[in-house]
Image (tube, rainbow, N blue to C red):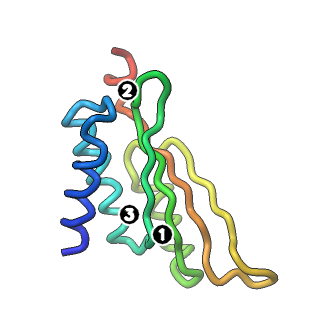
Amino acid sequence: MAQESLEKELMKLLRFGGLDKENLAELVNIVVGLQREGLTRIRVFPLGIPVVDGLQVRAVLDRDKIGSILGKIILQTPRSKGISVFPYGIPNPEIFEVNVELGATREAAIR
């Protein structure tokens, strides 16, 4: 239920961002998949100047899920352009902020 809600909300918010419908739908599906894997408190921002051609996803991740989810993001997330992780908590981080950049397809970038 939450995944459908996230998908609808992202499509509604990003539909005028300049991404074509197919590209937007694919990127939103990737974000929903990341949420399904365990990312919480997801925030999504359009990427690209002057033309939006990707998304930046910021989310929070619990310490016990960091290894499995980062592996899936790195190895199995299509169109991933970059990832960064910032620990919260000193000296033992409890949660991490994860930033994932998702880009356009090679075909869309050439246009």
Percent coordinates x, y for residue 14 in the rendering: 30, 43
Secondary structure, mark 3, is helix
Q: Nearer the viewer, residue 7 or 61?
A: 7
Secondary structure, mark 1, is helix
Percent coordinates x, y for residue 72 in the rendering: 44, 63
Mark nearer the N terminus (2 vs 1): 1
Q: Is residue 19 left or right of residue 63?
A: left
Please give the residue where the numbered disc 3 appears in the rendered image.
Answer: 34
Res. 25 image quadrant: top left
Q: Residue at x 57, y 52 (%)?
A: 83
Please give the residue where the numbered disc 1 appears in the rendered image.
Answer: 69
Amino acid type for the residue under numbered disc 2: Arg
Percent coordinates x, y for residue 16 in the rendering: 27, 35
Q: Is residue 86 above or below residue 109?
A: below
Amino acid type for the residue under numbered disc 3: Leu
Please give the residue where the numbered disc 2 appears in the rendered image.
Answer: 106
CB within 8 Å, label 2 to label 1: no
Secondary structure, mark 2, is helix
Amino acid type for the residue under numbered disc 1: Ile
Q: Is residue 90 above or below residue 10?
A: below
